[in-house]
Image (cartoon, rainbow, N blue to C red):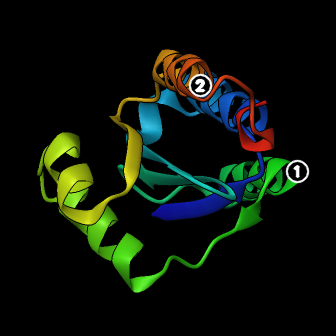
Amino acid sequence: MEYLYRFANASLTLRAIERLSFAWRSSVQFVTVVHQLDGWVLRLKLLSPLISKSHLDLQAFLLELGTPYLPSPQLKVVLWSLELGQSPISVMERHQVAVISHGRPDSGEIEEFCKQFIAGLGYCPATLT
């Protein structure tokens, strides 16, 4: 089972990652986080389908923070490449996309990306708050 959502900023993305790490840790196969100029994309792939109540709970939680997302053809290729085991660095270089995290949910990678991005720009864009 797979979920693909878009979040407006880093805070919402971090809340989602923290909740996934706590509540659905045993069900998660991998989580991919991609930063785009207008927000964040989170792809969650589970080891097996959730029972109805858990599925509805997860969906409701994700809908509170973000919106279901339909990826562009380029992003579909990026997500597929990562799932096939290509390294995030090679995928980023090939497709010019900012893959922040792929694998186990890790809020530290998102926080570090934001710090480095803000330091490089000298200000904080709305998507990094």
Q: Which mark is residue 1?
A: none
Q: In the visual, does 6 lie left or right of 30? A: right
Label 2 sits on residue: 114
Residue occupying image coordinates x 49% and y 51%? 44
Compute the Cα span from label 1 to label 2. 23 Å
Specify the quadrant of the image occupied by residue 124: top right
Question: Residue at (39%, 84%) from the top-left corner?
Answer: 73
Q: Earlier in the sequence, mark 1 or mark 2?
A: 1
Horizontal and vertical percent position of residue 38: 69, 59
Residue 127 is situated, as x and y percent measured from the top left of the image, at 74, 43
Q: Is residue 97 above or below residue 10?
A: below
Q: Please, which residue is most extreme toward the front here?
A: 122
Disc 1 on helix, strand or loop?
helix
Q: Is residue 10 left or right of residue 92?
A: right
**Left or right for 61, reference 80:** right
Q: Which is more toward the observer, 100 or 15?
A: 100
Quadrant of the frame with the N terminus:
bottom left
Q: Identify the residue shown where x is 60% and y is 56%.
A: 51
The answer to whether residue 100 is left or right of residue 5 is: left
The mark tally for this picture is: 2
Q: Which residue is mark 1?
A: 64
Amino acid type at mark 1: Glu
Give the residue drawn at x 64%, y 60%: 5
Q: Nearer the viewer, mark 1 or mark 2?
A: 2
Tell me the amino acid under the disc marked 2.
Cys
- Classify 61 as above or below 20: below
- Tell which of 19 and 11 is nearer to you: 11
Query: Which percent across, then down, holds residue 3?
Result: 55, 61
Q: Are marks 1 and 2 in contact (CB under 8 Å)?
A: no
SS type, badge 2? helix
Residue 20 in percent (x, y) is at 60, 33
Identify the residue at the far right of this view. 64
